[in-house]
Amino acid sequence: MMNHILPKSLALLTIGAGFASCSPSNIESQRPNILFIMTDDHTQQALHAYGQGLLDTVLFPNMDRLAKEGAIFMQSFVTNSICAPSRAVMLTGKHSHINGKIDNSVPFDWDQQNYPKLLQQAGYQTALIGKIHLAGAPQGYDYSMTLPGQGSYYNPEFIKNGEERLHFEGHCERIIPDFVVDWLDNEWDRNRPFAINYHTKAPHRNWMPEPEYLDFLEDHVFDFPENFFDDYEGRGTAAREQEMEIVNHMYWGWDMKFENNPFTGEPSRLAAPFGRMTDEQMADWNAVYGPPNEAFLKEMPEGRELAKFMYHRYLRDYLKTVKSVDDGIGQVLGYLEDNGLLENTVVIYTSDQGFYLGEHGWYDKRFMYEESFSTPLLVRFPGEISPGTKVHEMVVNLDLAPTILDYAGVEIPSDMQGASWREIATGKKVPWRDAVYYHYYEYPSVHMVKRHYGVRTDRYKLIHFYYDVDEWELYDLEEDPNEMQSVYGDPAYAEIQGMLHKRLLELREQYGDSDELQQQFLNEFLERSRN
Ligand code: SGN
Ligand code: CA
C-alpha cells in the first residue's frame, strides 16, 4: 500500500536525475523557439481536455488543440498557490522560501538568476508580454511590455521595457496577443531562436468580458459542483474561516456587476474600474447586464436561488474572459503556423495556479486543496511529443525553468530545485518524484486563508495549518477526491500518517525549508504590518 512513498535516498536520487540532463538531440539540431503561454487563475475544471464535467463541450478550441496535438499533464501542481509567488517560482526554478517571493506583497529580487537570463546568454531573443505582477524592471528580456501590477481589462496601461508607461484603447485580451504577433513580425531577429513569455490577465478577478463575448454562455445553465453547499465540517478551522465564499464574500459592484447593492441600495463597493470604460463600451455592457439585473431586483431571490444567480454570474463572466484568452492563443498559433514556425516551437500552456469555480462554495485559490493546488499544463512540440499524450507523473511549476532550459539545450544550474519533464512529455518512463511539497504564506490577508504547508503523494495529502492554529489534515484522495473529511488521527490511517510526516520532514530538509525560516518570514510580515 505504501510503495509509492519512496525512501528518502531513492527519492533524492530520482529527482536529482532530472537536474543536469540536457537532451543531446536538442543541442545538435536546430534550437527550438519557445512560446510560454501563462494565464492568470485559469483552472483545470475550465478546460474540456481535463474532463471533470463542468464543460461538457469544447469551449476553448485553441487550448484544447494543444492538448490534442501534444501532451496533457494530469497531475500538475504549484508550490504556493498565489500569483506573484508562483511566477517567481517559474522564473527561478526555486521554492518561494529560497527565491524570497513568499507572498504577493514582499518585493521580488530581479537581480537573482532566472531562466530567461540564461536563455539570453545562450543566444535566445527573449520577450515578456502581458501580466507578470512582479514589481521592478524585468530582467532577462530583450523586450518587455507588461501590465502594471494587476493591470486593467479595459483601456489598459502597459509598461514598456520597465520604464515607459503607455495607454491603449480596447480590451487587454485583444491587446496582449496583438503585441505578441507584432513583436514576432517586427522585432524578432530571424537568425536567433525566440523565447516569448505571453502572459494574459484573464481570467483574474473581476472577470470583465470584452464586448464581443458579453453574451457568451448567458443562457447556459450549469450544475452546482456537488460540494457547493459545503458546511465545512470534517476539516479544521482553516476551511471554515476563509473569506472566499461566492455567496458571502463577493462584491455586488466589482464581481456581480450591479451599480448598487440590491439589498441595501448603497452604491456598490469597488465599482471603480468601470470608470475606465468609454460610453460605447459601457452601453454594450449595460445592454447585457441591465435586463437580468433588473429581473433580479424585481424577484430579490434568496437562499438557493440567490446562490444560483451569483454562481452563474461568476462562472459565466469567468468563462467569457477565458474565451478571449483562447482567441488570443488561436491568433498567435495561427501566426506561427502561417509563417512556418509552429513545428519548431515548443508551445507550453499553463496558469499561475488553479482556482475554485464553486467547489466548497468558493472562488479564489491559496489552499493546498486540489482545485487551487493543481494548474493546467499542456505542451506541444510535434518533433518529439506524440499527439494525445497523457502524462500522469506529478509535475510542479518549479519544473518549468529547468524544462525550458532543457528544450533550449542550456545547462540547468544545480541550484534549481525543479526537474526537467522534457523526457516525460514524450511518454517515456524515467525515475521521477514521488511527492510534491507546498507552502503558502499570505495570512492574515485578503481571503483569510491560513498559513500552511504540506506534502502530496499520488494518493494522500498531509497539510499543517500554523500561526494562529496548529492543525493537521490528512486526505485520502482516492476515497475522498473532494477533500471533505480529514482522516488525520484516524487509527486506520496511522501508518500512512506516520509515513507522510516522515516524507514531509525529508522534503523540508531537501528543499531547505524549516520552522525557523517560516518563523522568520512571519516575524518580517508582522513587522511590516506594524509599519
Ligand atoms: C486581489 C483580488 C483577490 C485576489 C488577489 C490576488 N481582489 O486582491 O481576490 O485573491 O488580488 O490575486 S480584488 O478585489 O482586487 O479583485 S493574484 O492572482 O494576483 O494573486
Ligand atoms: Ca493568479
Image (cartoon, rainbow, N blue to C red):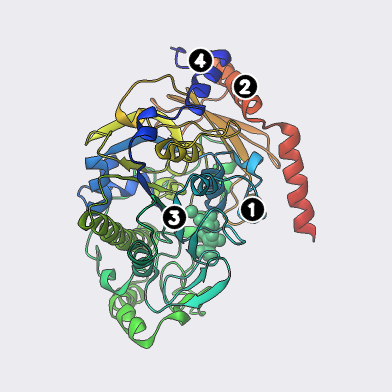
Q: Which mark is residue 6?
A: 4
Of labels 4 and 1, the one closer to you: 1
Q: CA distance from mark 2 to mark 1?
A: 27 Å
Image-based side of 184 in relation to 387, left or right: right
Most extreme residue toward the bottom, as rendered? 279
Q: Residues within 10 Å of mark 3 (few under 14, many from 20)?
A: many
Judging from the image, what secondary structure is the residue with disc 3 in? loop
Sequence-first tag of 3 and 4: 4
In the image, the residue with mark 3 has its CB under 8 Å from the nearest atom of ligand 2: yes
Cα–Cα span, label 4 and label 2: 11 Å
From the top left corner, tell me how far across and down residue 329 is, in percent: 30, 57
Q: Which badge, 3 or 2, is on the more N-terminal residue?
A: 3
Tag 1 or tag 4, which sits nearer the N-term? 4
Tag 2: amino acid: Glu
Res. 40 mark = 3
Q: Is residue 52 visible to the viewer in this orientation of the structure? A: no
Q: Which residue is mark 2?
A: 506
Residue with the mark numbered 1: 108
Of 385 and 398, nearer the camera is 385
Viewer-proximal residue among 297 and 374: 374
Q: Secondary structure at mark 4?
A: loop
Mark 4 neighbour density, 10 Å: few (under 14) some (14–19) many (20 or more): some
